[in-house]
Image (tube, grey):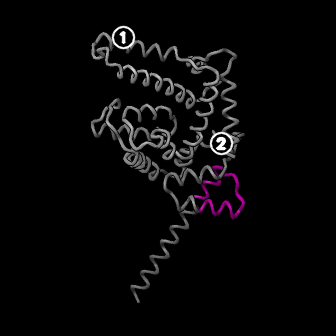
């Protein structure tokens, strides 16, 4: 089901971008009135910034020029600005990037912690702070997770452009802490508002009462370590043949689970009191 949605949205995005020219400029993408999704804009801008970063690395590897000289530093600063303004994509690359963009966003929406770790570290044990922050710029939604990482940098007096290394295990710990500080203090209404991007992306027909595949919510809860609810939802959906879920149903479902938990706690407390009395 997810593959079909991703393929459809990837094709739609590419069709909006492809104007029949040999190259499509970043400025054309950002100014395309048919592409108003900020997440797409951020992804393509971050891709160009990564190109520029690779150019900067190539310069540093050349020992024949004194790159510390202020004149060269000023020159390359201006050059990098021009690189960004004049960045362009050929059609095969644009098609590939459209698919990567949609697929990455689709996964990030339902599994933000997992997707960030995979997208940034790509199987490697460490990455520089600079590379981590550049990769974070690809993502638009759930900004509080990124904010939590930047707050950690500030509290440790680490610059975002630092070449110091950070391990994937430490990165996971940081974003998990940032995520938990927010998610576990949310009301039910705030939680449903948080997953609005999932409804916008995965709902084919965003009508008055949109619904999403129940698997998306199961993955979302599981990614956040809320396993009791994700497992319960998985079992209930299978038992009752539930394939999609809407907001009113979700709200009532969470309320029922909380009430069930409170009743269970009260019963346990009563049992303990009765045992003590006896």
Q: Nearer the viewer, residue 219 or 271?
A: 219
Range of the magenta residues?
A: 232-256
State the SS at label 2. Answer: helix
Q: Nearer the viewer, residue 209 or 69?
A: 69
- Residue placed at 28% from the left, 17% from the top? 68
Q: Nearer the viewer, residue 66 or 202?
A: 66
| 43 relative position to 10: left or right | left
Q: Can you give x and y, in whole percent of width and height, for residue 139 in the image?
A: 50, 35
> Which residue position holds label 2?
202
State the SS at label 1. Answer: helix
- Residue placed at 35% from the left, 29% from the top? 161
- Earlier in the chain: of badge 1 and badge 2, it is 1
- Residue placed at 58% from the left, 20% from the top? 89
Vertical relation: 172 (above or below) 228: above
| 197 relative position to 119: left or right | right
The verdict on residue 60 being magenta is no
| Label 2 environment density (alpha carbons within 10 Å; few <14, some 14–19, many ≥20) | many
Vertical relation: 229 (above or below) 265: above
Mark 1 and mark 2: Cα distance apart in space = 45 Å
Which of the two discs, 1 and 2, sits closer to the camera? 1
Mark drawn on residue 75 = 1
Q: Quadrant of residue 53?
A: top left
Q: Can you give x and y, in whole percent of width and height, for residue 80 in the image?
A: 42, 16
Vertical relation: 133 (above or below) 31: below
């Amino acid at each position: 089901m997810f593959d079909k949605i991703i393929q459809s949205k990837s094709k739609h995005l590419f069709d909006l971008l492809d104007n029949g020219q040999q190259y499509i400029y970043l400025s054309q993408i950002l100014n395309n009135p048919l592409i108003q999704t900020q997440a797409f804009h951020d992804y393509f801008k971050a891709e160009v910034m990564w190109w520029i970063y690779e150019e900067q690395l190539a310069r540093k590897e050349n020992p024949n020029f004194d790159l510390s000289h202020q004149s060269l530093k000023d020159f390359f600063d201006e050059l990098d600005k021009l690189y960004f303004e004049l960045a362009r994509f050929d059609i095969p690359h644009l098609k590939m990037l459209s698919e990567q963009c949609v697929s990455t966003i689709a996964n990030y929406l339902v599994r933000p912690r997992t997707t960030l770790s995979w997208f940034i570290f790509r199987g490697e044990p460490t990455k520089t702070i600079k590379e981590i922050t550049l990769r974070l710029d690809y993502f638009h939604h759930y900004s509080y997770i990124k904010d939590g990482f930047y707050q950690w940098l500030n509290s440790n007096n680490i610059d975002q452009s630092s070449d110091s290394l950070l391990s994937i295990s430490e990165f996971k710990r940081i974003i998990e802490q940032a995520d938990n500080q927010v998610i576990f203090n949310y009301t039910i209404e705030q939680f449903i508002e948080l997953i609005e991007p999932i409804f916008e992306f995965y709902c084919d027909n965003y009508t008055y009462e949109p619904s999403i595949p129940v698997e998306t919510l199961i993955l979302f809860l599981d990614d956040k370590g809320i396993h009791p609810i994700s497992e319960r939802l998985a079992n209930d959906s299978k038992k009752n043949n539930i394939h999609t879920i809407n907001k009113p149903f979700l709200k009532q479902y969470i309320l029922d689970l909380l009430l069930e938990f409170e009743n269970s706690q009260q019963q346990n407390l009563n049992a303990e009191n009765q045992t003590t009395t006896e």
